[in-house]
Amino acid sequence: MSYTTLNYSKGDEIDVKIDRPGLGMDEGIAHLDDNTMVVVVGAGDRVGETVHAVITGRLQTSLGDSFMASLKP
């Protein structure tokens, strides 16, 4: 996956379905259509729901890119 394929930036708003709880307190894990992981802060109790979130950052690891986001109030 290439970050430029998605072209999301800090502040962009997205709708994602929360697949499972995250490792951190109150985090939910979602995946984009290309399987890129999105960690949504504030969505730990929203598994199975589609939420509106704001991209807050991007993480690059040896496994690929992922995004950090927070729930849009």
Image: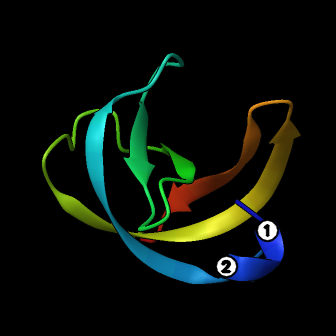
Asked which quadrant contains residue 59, the reply is top right
Most foreground residue, 1 or 44: 1
Q: CA distance from mark 2 to mark 1?
A: 6 Å
**Above or below, 16 relative to 70:** below
Q: Residue at x 82, y 78 (%)?
A: 4
Residue 67 x/y as whole percent: 67, 54
Disc on res. 58: none
Instruction: Report crowding for label 2: few under 14, some 14 to 19, many 20 or more residues within 10 A (C-alpha).
Output: few
Question: Which amino acid type is shown beneath numbered disc 1?
Answer: Tyr
Residue 64 x/y as whole percent: 76, 43
Asked which quadrant contains residue 52, the reply is bottom left
> Element under label 1?
helix
**Above or below, 54 relative to 13:** above
Q: Is residue 54 left or right of residue 8?
A: left
**Above or below, 35 relative to 72:** above
> Element under label 2?
helix
Q: Residue at x 49, y 64 (%)?
A: 34
Q: Residue at x 47, y 53 (%)?
A: 35
What quarter of the picture does the N terminus occupy?
Answer: bottom right
Which residue does the numbered mark 2 point to in the structure image?
6
Residue 7 x/y as whole percent: 75, 83
Which residue does the numbered mark 1 point to in the structure image?
3
Residues at marks 2 and 1 touching, judged by CB atoms closer than 8 Å = yes
Q: Residue at x 85, y 30 (%)?
A: 62
Q: Is residue 42 left or right of residue 66?
A: left
Residue 37 appears in the figure: yes
Most foreground residue, 5 or 39: 5
Most foreground residue, 11 or 4: 4
Instruction: Report crowding for label 1: few under 14, some 14 to 19, many 20 or more residues within 10 A (C-alpha).
Output: some
